[in-house]
Image: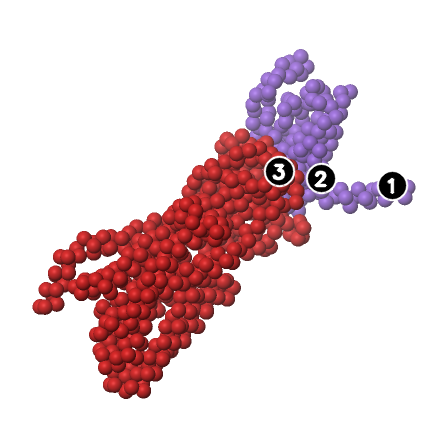
Chain colours: A red, B purple
Amino acid sequence: MNAAQSSSTIRMHTGPIAWLVALLVAMAVLAMPGRAFAHAALVATDPADGALLEQSPAQFSLTFSEPVSPLVLTLVRPDGSQLALTSFRLNDQTVEIDNPETLKSGTHVLSWRVVSVDGHPVGGSALFSIGAPSAAPVAGEAVDWTLRAAIWTARLFFYAGLFLGVGGAFALAWLAKDRRCGQRFVAAALLLALVAAPVSLGLQGLDGLGAPLARFATPAVWKTALETSFVWTVLVGLIALGLALLSLAGPPGLRKLSAGTALLCVGGALAASGHASAAEPQWLTRPLVFLHGTAIAVWAGALAPLGLALRREPANAKAFLRRFSRAILPVVILLAASGIVLGVIQVQEPAALVHTAYGRLLLLKLVLLLFLFTLAAVNRWTLTAPAEAGDTEVQRRLVRSIGIEVVIVLAIFGVAAGWRFTPPPRALAIAAAQPVSIHIHTLEAMADLSITPGHPGTVAASMVIMTGDFGPLDAKQVTLVLSKPDSGIEPIKRPARKPGDGTWRVDNLVIPLPGRWKARLDILVSDFEAVKIEAPIDIRSD
Amino acid sequence: MKKYILAAGALCTLGTSAALAHITLETQEAAVGSTYKAVLRVPHGCEGKTTTAVRVQIPEGVIAVKPMPKPGWTLQTKKGNYEKSYQLYGETLTTGVKEVGWSGGNLPDEFYDEFVFRASLAADLPAGQMLYFPVVQECGDATDRWIEIPATGQDADALETPAPGIKLLPKK
């Protein structure tokens, strides 16, 4: 009766705030666009990397595995001078860039840096030559380790502050009996995150532009940062921090509600950006990241206040310990289950755990988790009961153990912050599955040929045939002939079939080797007239 | 003498594989303005299959075509307009046979046969150049198309399925 009364009073007071917060969380979790997102990987460039052109092209294009937003596009001339490319259009997954000048002969570098929906900037470059190749100009995408260290540190502080601070505030409000123990620690964590959040955002902007730390305060950096999805994480995270501070210092009536909402905001902040939330299927990954983040905050956040309470006021801490140990099992199950599903989505196959940087970080995290779970299990099933019963020796051991747990949790946050720099195997797999495409143009006929995926193995070829002047060519028959004379591979001939969508297809074609192949299309125009067109096609080695 | 044998041997080794595998014309030279008896030599089926039809496209400038019937084969011609008119024995010809087809026959892969037509080569055909007669060989559901014409400067021997052709000689 009493409880019901107080909660209805709270609702009256905080209705608008609660709604606003709920709305923001809902926006962050659900309203992100639901197309096929991955860590953006470059699929194709025009001119192709390594291409030799006769004339200066009127435009360039970059095609990615998902829609992107360009941050910096630069053309490096043969003499090393740079030209900023500012006029571009977005066409689905392709960035079409106008070439503002007639390029002189020699090798040029088209250097690009884009940001994708997961909020992570990626960069790269393509080389092409006009007339004849010259020595390639220097356009290194050198790794700025200072910047990386700064990004990693800011992220670590942001996560640690968010989870330990907001989670700690939640534990104090909902689980602790005496809220004074650990309050200072929680407040410190919150303030740390409050500083780390905007710093993280600014560093995101720097990374987006590929600019050095010295340009941290420039408007362009912040403008770039505000265009990435990470801004949502920071925004929702700041709301969480604010609400958590409110629960510490605000009126007692608001304590539980604001701490609870802050906790949900932590989940929302995590779900708003990052590799895991950007993965398909979005309806599954975003809620899972939300649950994962919320569960981390509940568990990790309670550790420090609990340890401090046990050390300072063991008598009062018993109730805290009892509530914590009762609540923690479902939370950890939720944490592990959501983590496993997200991990499987990202890594896709066990081999990637070893082969990719992302997978190795995940392995490291799993090892740390194994320690953490072992400690937690010992605490829960061996130490908790005697500690609750008042065994001081056991209580001391429990405090030590909780201290180690906090350290391991921080190490796990550190590993997770490292993921900021590694595309997940899922995104790498999407890049590997991309087709290679060529355009063959002769006087008699032209064709667009795509081989999917563009690496050795069983592939499918798709062809669109046109006359030499872009008119329709109703071929009676099309045969794809692939050969690799330098490797002694004789022509592999496959008749194409017409699936009825205007293309010609060859399925279940096996390409045994990577490298430069000769692709020929034998197009039967009429009973007595055939056209053969051919061009090299580069099969990737991955 | 020894030279001749060597030359003949070389011709055999070099020439046989190509010549035996393709559909060719027996007489490979003819003067413009003359009557030409075309004998299409069909040395084998389509990758081992029995030949059931042979169709030949008549190039522009080859007029007054008369194919020779073959027992066991249905002879058909397709007529059409010439690109221009031709004079033949005081007559003006504007239309004529554009395609000849022998179908419904049965020529197993291990046997050889010939398909014959007679035609006049117009006097204004360019002497010194090649004239090609693209041929489609049908073997039930399989088809071999002897329709490749070498591009300028391209070696005819490099073609996989060359169209049979003759060299046009100056008018006698």
Q: Where does residue A133 sit, x and y in percent of width and height?
A: 65, 42
Which marked residue is nearer to the observer: mark 2 or mark 3? 3
Q: Identify the mark at residue B33; answer none if there is no mark.
A: none
Determine if residue A141 is in view: yes
Q: Residue furthest right?
A: B1
Disc 3 residue crowd, few under 14, some 14–19, many 20+, Cα 10 Å:
many
Distance of label 1 from label 3 (alpha carbons): 54 Å
User: Which chain does tag 3 point to?
Assistant: A
Residue sitting nearer the eye, A385 or A490? A385
Looking at the picture, tell me which residue is in the foreground, A480 or A198.
Answer: A198
Give the SS element for disc 3: strand
Where's the C terminus of chain A, which quadrant?
bottom right
The residue that appears at 69% across and 19% down in the rendered structure is: B124
Residue A341: image quadrant is: bottom left
Please give the name of the residue rendered at 63% of the width and 24% of the height, measured from the top-left corner: B60
For disc 2, the marked residue is B157
User: What residue is shown with label 3?
Assistant: A130
Q: Secondary structure at mark 2?
A: helix
Q: Which residue is mark 1?
A: B4
- Crowdedness near tag 1: few (<14), some (14–19) or many (≥20) residues, C-alpha within 10 Å: few
Look at label 3 and name its amino acid.
Answer: Ile
Q: Are marks 2 and 1 in contact (CB under 8 Å)?
A: no
Q: Is residue A442 above or below residue B33?
A: below
Q: Chain of mark 1?
A: B
